[in-house]
Image (tube, rainbow, N blue to C red):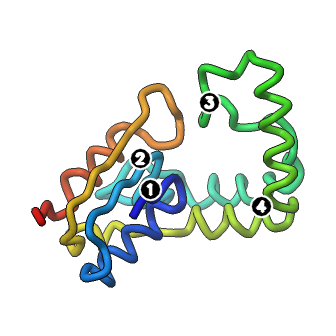
Amino acid sequence: MVGVSGGGGMSATSAATYPERTAWRIRAGSYPSALKRPAYPWGNTEEAIQRSIDRVADVWGTVINMERYAPSQVDNPEVARWWANFMQMSASPGDARDLLSMNLHIDIGHLLPVIRVPSLTIHVTGAGITHLAAWRYVVVHVHVAGP
């Protein structure tokens, strides 16, 4: 099972709930929670999360957040046009708002120690999706199991 971005939480939930159906799990560009907590300081405040949700419909379909997903391509106009088109074709502005709200309110921190399948967590250097310390948090808190 592979979970990228918001799919990382879904893959963790599935692996924790149905370990007999999961041979192994890979997660990339994902985080256990977008919300900052005392034991997890790399998230955002609830107010910052709400501002992002409120803003996304107004800027959806423009060249936004490319620096977080493709930092080496920020100055490439061809990729920027593709990025904006990709966003427009993938969801309506309202759907983007709803999806972002869902993704930013997922918290799988409590599931990490329950995962008993072999897991690989990938962090891309330079991508601003997940703070490196949050990636390390996941690695430390997932129970490591062999086949």
Which residue position holds label 1? 36
Residue reaching furthest left? 146
Label 2 element class: loop
Mark 1 vs mark 4, foreground winner is 4
Label 3 element class: loop
- In which image quadrant can residue 2 be found? bottom left
Mark 4 vs mark 2, foreground winner is 4
| Tags 1 and 2 touching, CB below 8 Å | yes
User: How many angstroms separate mark 3 from mark 2 (CA)?
Assistant: 21 Å
Among numbered discs 4 and 2, the one appearing first in the sequence: 2
- Disc 2 marks a residue whose amino acid type is Trp
Q: Quadrant of the N terminus?
A: bottom left
**For residue 70, which numbered disc appears in the image?**
3
Is residue 145 or residue 49 the one in the foreground? 145
Residue at left offset 35%, top offset 46%:
134
Label 1 element class: loop
Residue at left offset 31%, top offset 80%:
21
Is residue 14 or residue 65 the one in the foreground? 14
- Disc 1 marks a residue whose amino acid type is Lys
Relative to 110, 4 lies left or right: right
Among numbered discs 3 and 2, the one appearing first in the sequence: 2
Mark 3 vs mark 2, foreground winner is 3
Mark 3 vs mark 1, foreground winner is 3
- Disc 3 marks a residue whose amino acid type is Ala
Which residue position holds label 4? 96
